[in-house]
Amino acid sequence: MLGFLIRFIPRAVGQGIPLMYGSVGETLTEKSGHLNLGTAGIMYVGGICGVIGAFLYETGRKTLNPFLGIAIPLVCCLVGSLLMGLLYCFLTVSLRANQNVTGLAMTTFGIGFGNFFGGSLIKLSHADLPSIALSKTSALFAAKLPFAGSLGWVGKIFFSYSFLAYAAILIALGVSYVLNHTRTGLNLRAVGESPATADAAGINVTRYKYTATCIGAMISGLGGLYYVFDYASGVWSNNAFGDRGWLAIALVIFTIWQPVHSIWASIAFGGLYILHMFIPAGTNLAIKEIYQMAPFLATILMLILTSINNKRENQPPASLGLSYFREDR
């Protein structure tokens, strides 16, 4: 049993960290009253922007400066994700476009953007396979704590992860603290519940919506960066992200809009996502497909339970998905 946990938990954590980034970023966005269904596209853009920065820096160099090797992809990822967040805000806050349609368009655009530049880099690298491997940069991002190997199973389960994994936990805790224990968080939650009331109280609704959505997009983009350079060992392949962006949005419902819950919930989702790899199913592919439905079934079950247990604190922000027209006050 211990051997199974040693193999299973690190894989579940590695699978869950991108979901944690995506869900925390989306939760912060939704607290402002915005439903950003473009999270999948933002994660994709964050990943490819990091790959572009790493490719330009790594190509032609035998050794990398550790600081620049991490800083360049990280900054490129954050800038690309920020631009996606600004684009979404411009369309939905300034132009008051439909949030659902805009989010879906952002996902389509983000995936197309990633595939276009990913395919271009693959051609530039003259790779034999339809992928590009940035192993030097990946080694920097995937570096583990040096003392993890000397702690046995404790080290493997708790200390065998990269800095981005621990950063995801710190960001989730930080966002939770800001939302629940600061005036800024109180104002943001007020904007999400009733922007007209917040506006009447002197809160700059537009500024809070822009800030929360853009920071949320940058956090989500880090999930794409982690997936490429840590989980996928620096290998970029078009359409390799799968449905992780949508799972991150589902995780927001599962955590009842509480970022701190995403720490354990994302790991649980990551475990459910890879469960089919650890449960023997023989040659019966239908059984494996049923196992792969586990995270989505868990989301549906949580949605049902949340609807039955109709507590206000377990519900989404009251103005979620609704554009704010100041003239309607």
Image (cartoon, helix red, strand yellow):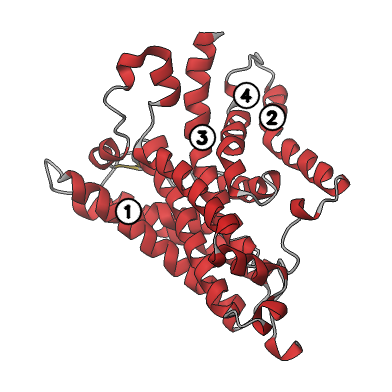
Instruction: Work out whether mark 1 precedes mark 3 in sequence or the reverse, and give the earlier one.
Output: 3
Which residue occupies the foreground of this view, 156 or 176? 176
Q: Which mark is residue 74?
A: 1
Where is residue 167 shown, x and y percent of the image? 41, 44
Instruction: Work out whether mark 3 precedes mark 4 in sequence or the reverse, and give the earlier one.
Output: 3
Q: CA distance from mark 3 to mark 4?
A: 13 Å
Instruction: Find disc 2 in the rendering and name its residue.
Output: 289
Where is residue 91 shown, x and y percent of the image? 57, 78
Total number of numbered discs in the rendering? 4
Instruction: Work out whether mark 2 precedes mark 3 in sequence or the reverse, and give the earlier one.
Output: 3
Instruction: Work out whether mark 4 precedes mark 1 in sequence or the reverse, and give the earlier one.
Output: 1
Location of residue 161 with respect to 302 vertically, above or below: above
* Residue that sits furthest to the right in the current view: 308
Task: Determine contact: label 1, label 3, CB under 8 Å.
Answer: no
Instruction: Find disc 3 in the rendering and name its residue.
Output: 15
Residue 147 is left or right of residue 166, and the answer is: left
